[in-house]
Image (cartoon, grey):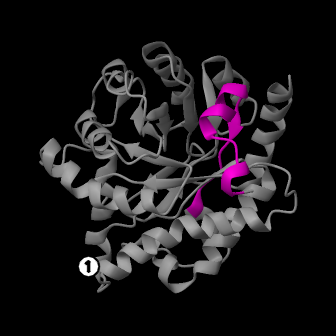
Amino acid sequence: MTGPTLPALTDALASGPLVLDGGMSNQLESAGHDLSDGLWSARLLAECPEAVTEAHLAYYEAGADVAITASYQATFEGFARHGISRGRAAELLGLSVELAREATRRVKDASRPLWVAASVGPYGAMLADGSEYRGRYGLTVAELEAFHRPRLEVLAEAGPDVLALETVPDTEEAEALLRGVRGLGVPAWLSYTVAGDRTRAGQPLEEAFALAADLDAIVAVGVNCCAPEDVHGAAATAARVTGKPVVVYPNSGETWDAGTRTWTGRSTFTAEQVTGWQRAGARLIGGCCRVGPEAIAAIAATVRPARAR
């Protein structure tokens, strides 16, 4: 459902919780696609865009209300390293939004409103070395803003319902992103990757969330790409500090081994946790790495009765 009849995401959030999608990369990998190079899922925007649409569709059909585009690792600088011109990179960024929008047109239940969130990953995602889980890149806030702003402009022009400023590891990058969305005319959410009650760079979450508290353009704040066990406390802090709806989409609970490029451990992500997250203030709830359509369907089954009430 698109166009002028689509309710604003902010209005929908005021009515009750919404379901986000799950991990794009694990859905593409399960379909047999190799994501081992530095562009990760963004490579398929150029090489196999239909696979991206099908991944979005799988999550919408599982019950997601909001899909996050495959632009997390899509940057002008990252594409340039792979021989892709700036003009073509801009086309691919815009395409990421259109592919998600196309998936909304293919959903069997055409009566259900569906939204598209344009992913804006951190600077460290472009480096493809895991530094998004450390932050503190040695760049100033102004330099980070200069990196993010052109991509934000292109994504905003493509017409998403919201910009997902996600997997942000520290307050310096958050400040740069919050400056970067000024004047774009598209709402955004701000989502940190955290460890316990701090950002990955070690800053208290009270300080981190406070940056967005008084910004009307930011419609939700929260956490993603973290352990499920870290969500409840972070959600409660975000709600208390900002008074805004909270967005949460943790990983499965497994651990990524950068040396072997494999996941280890077991999943600790369960739909039963969702009720507690809602009580803490979560209104946008989904999953990140290693969380697939089955888990999103379970979240939807938990969230929708609450929304109906």
Give the residue displayed 29% in from the left and 78% down from the top: 86
Asked whether 173 or 157 is in front, the reply is 157
What kind of element bears circle 1?
helix
Task: Say which quarter of the image contains residue 72.
Answer: bottom left
Can the viewer see residue 120?
A: yes
* Horizontal relation, residue 263 to residue 73: left or right: right
- Relative height, residue 42 to residue 286 (above, below): below
* Horizontal relation, residue 186 to residue 207: left or right: right
Give the residue displayed 70% in from the left and 66% down from the top: 103
x and y, in percent, of residue 56 in the image: 67, 63
Magenta-colored span:
2-24
Identify residue for label 1.
Answer: 81
- At label 1, counting other C-alpha atoms closer than 10 Å, the crowd grade (few under 14, some 14-19, many 20 or more) is few
The quadrant of the image that shows the N terminus is bottom right
Give the residue displayed 56% in from the left and 45% down from the top: 251
The quadrant of the image that shows the C terminus is top right
**Residue 14 inside the magenta-drawn segment:** yes
x and y, in percent, of residue 120 in the image: 41, 54
Asked whether 52 or 160 is in front, the reply is 160
Can the viewer see residue 114?
A: no
x and y, in percent, of residue 209 in the image: 38, 25
Amino acid type, label 1: Arg
* Horizontal relation, residue 213 to residue 58: left or right: left
x and y, in percent, of residue 152 in the image: 36, 56
Task: Say which quarter of the image contains residue 170.
Answer: top left
**Residue 75 inside the magenta-drawn segment:** no
